[in-house]
Amino acid sequence: MPVDKKVITRKITFINRDLKLLADLSRLTLSEYLKKPEYEALAERYLERIIGRMIDINYHILAKAEKHSPLDMYNSFVDMGKKRYLNNRLAERLANSAGLRNRLTHEYDEIDERKIYKAIRSCLEDVPKYLLRIEKLINKKSKQKKLL
């Protein structure tokens, strides 16, 4: 079964919406951010949703185009790099976000609000690069009909 461009496009739309909301939080200074616990809660939720949707995209592309299932969420990014859907450096940086997503989702450890604040900036830097690569991929491949 081919990659479903509509599924990926819908997830990209949701990611972009959350990136805009996350960008609002990025305008706060660290001291402003730390004053209100709801800022951290919002940031955590936006990050969790963004990362989760990227992982969904990875699994979808790898399963449909490569007939491959990654070992785990971390490896979904690594495998996207190995298959040249992402450059390896970006794939490695984003792979680390899978661990953050797990900590946020499953509350394995107490979350350091300063690390979340830092993750906002990393997300706003790396995720648009990821989305650009995915959009180019699905547009290029839809013309070739190989992937879709």
Image: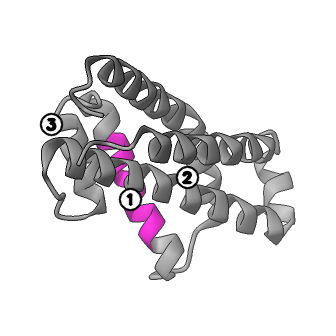
Position of the C terminus, as image quadrant, is top left
User: What's under tag 1, amino acid-wise?
Assistant: Ala
Tell me how the rendering is colored: one colour
Query: Tag 1, which secondary structure?
Result: helix
Q: Which residue is mark 3?
A: 82
Q: Which mark is residue 25?
A: none
Seen at 44% across and 49% down, the residue is: 54
Report x, y in % for residue 29: 80, 44
Report x, y in % for residue 121: 61, 40
Closer to the camera in the image, 134 or 7: 7
Query: Tag 3, which secondary structure?
Result: helix
Mark 2 or mark 1, which has the lower sequence index?
A: 2
Residue 79 versus residue 73 in the image, above or below: above
Report x, y in % for residue 130: 43, 33
Mark 2 or mark 3, which has the lower sequence index?
A: 2
Seen at 39% across and 48% down, the residue is: 57
Q: Quadrant of residue 33?
A: bottom right
Give how far apart the Cα atoms at labels 2 and 3 are. 22 Å
Q: Which residue is mark 2?
A: 50
Part of the protein shown in magenta? 92-102
Query: Tag 2, which secondary structure?
Result: helix
User: What's under tag 2, amino acid-wise?
Assistant: Ile
Q: Quadrant of residue 69?
A: bottom left
Closer to the camera in the image, 120 or 136: 136
Q: Is residue 115 visible?
A: no
User: What's under tag 3, amino acid-wise?
Assistant: Lys
Mark 3 or mark 1, which has the lower sequence index?
A: 3
Q: Which residue is mark 1?
A: 98
- Circles 3 and 1: CB atoms closer than 8 Å: no
Residue 127 versus residue 102 in the image, above or below: above
Give how far apart the Cα atoms at labels 2 and 1 are. 11 Å
Seen at 13% across and 50% down, the residue is: 67
